Amino acid sequence: MLLLTMTYGGKLLRCSTRTEALEHQWHGMVQRIDPIQIRSAKEYGGWLQVNAPTVVFSPELCDPVIGLIATYPPPRQIQCTVQGTATTEAAAVTLCSGVLVLKSISETGIEYDLYSDPYLPTPSFGQTLAVQHSFNASDWHNSYQDGDRFLRASLDGGSAWGSAVQYLMPGGTSLASWAPSAHLVSGFFTQLASVLGLTLDASLASEVDPLISGTISSDSMILSVADSVAAYFGHYFMIENSILHLIDANADAGDPHSFGIWDYVRGPKYNWQAPVNAVYDSEGKTAIVGNTLFGQRINAGAAHYAPDAMYLRQIADYSEMPQIDLTVMDWYGQFRVGRHALWIDDRHAQDIAVELVMRAVQYEFGTTGDKMTVSGEGVIA
């Protein structure tokens, strides 16, 4: 079920799509929440982004007499965390968090959009977010100027400031010099986590530590560079609760479970993609050309990061696998992009064993039940 925990006026508020008594009482005041989808922009890796939802509450949420928020009109923003669980509150998995910002008010519902920013702290109600920019992390000004690549934020209107965060990588930056010992895990992403003020979790990253080379041709957002690096080497990364998680799309570590298809899966679809015709890096230095006259051309990244074509071949292999969509019930948190799922499809004359590399997970919540849709590339034995 959906667990939507909000903070407003110093109070902790608990709402759901239905009234439910778990460890605490959850109030069924969520009329609708849009599907939460977690996926990467590139099918073969990169930065995992969460499509934060729009939430519609029943008007009773802000009723001056019986409402959880006894004020009207509704507040402009509310701190919020969205979780899902099939059993208890202790087993709940955080799906997304941020600030609910008031979108519209009607007689039948109060609509909020959920916002989150990886570079800036999330203010609570009553706090005033202020941002300053700098080119050297020491001389600060209120408006962005050409050459700036650091920012800092204040939650009290400028009385106290947080640490400097580097968000822009200047053109001409050598990745090897920017991150000493510039390997996928030990160098680049360690440095990335450091400049963003994050903690690195590389427990599911590849044990192979390939050397990264290349120079950034123009000023680029650091997360955009990291997106290209991770995707090129078949990795995903996501930022959650000040932790940067780095995940190898092919790692055996982190397999959540094996199961029979009738246990938790309903109606999978097996869709074969057209083979990849060619895979290039954006500088055209290396190409993998398919043996067909059709298919897609894939750009592997913003720079040439390795001395051979091994990773380009891997990208081509990802895209030539069959696409499989599954509807999976009651497994919140077990299905994470970049992890593997194993199952047996026993509906055929001969059982079919399938290993799925998850590329996207979508959560849909309703008043009568919840649904998760997992999609990705499957290897059919």
Image (spheres, grey):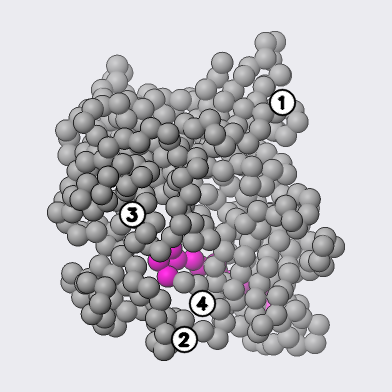
Type of amino acid under label 1: Gly
Task: Please tell me which of labels 1 and 3 falls first in the chain.
Answer: 3
Q: Measure the alpha-carbon separation of dots 1 and 3.
A: 42 Å
Tag 1 secondary structure: strand
Mark seen at residue 260? 1
Q: Is residue 325 visible?
A: no
Image point (63%, 36%), residue name: 256
Residue 118 colored in magenta in the image:
yes
Q: Measure the alpha-carbon separation of dots 4 and 2.
A: 9 Å
Task: Please tell me which of labels 4 and 2 falls first in the chain.
Answer: 4
Task: Please tell me which of labels 1 and 4 falls first in the chain.
Answer: 4
Q: Which residue is mark 2?
A: 156
Q: Nearer the viewer, mark 3 or mark 2?
A: 3
Task: Please tell me which of labels 3 and 4 falls first in the chain.
Answer: 4
Query: Circles 3 and 2: CB distance less than 8 Å?
Result: no
Q: Which residue is mark 3?
A: 191
Q: Measure the alpha-carbon separation of dots 1 and 2.
A: 53 Å
- Front-most of 198 and 149? 198
Q: Quadrant of the N terminus?
A: bottom right
Crowd rating for badge 1 (residues with CA inside 10 Å; few <14, some 14–19, many 20+): few
Give coordinates of residue 297: x percent, y percent: 29, 32
Q: Measure the alpha-carbon separation of dots 1 and 4.
A: 45 Å
Q: Nearer the viewer, mark 1 or mark 3?
A: 3
Type of amino acid under label 4: Pro
Give coordinates of residue 344: x percent, y percent: 67, 22
Type of amino acid under label 3: Gln
- Front-most of 156 and 41? 156
Give coordinates of residue 235: x percent, y percent: 41, 40
Give the residues drawn in magenta, as a range.
107-120
**Occupied quadrant, residue 260:** top right
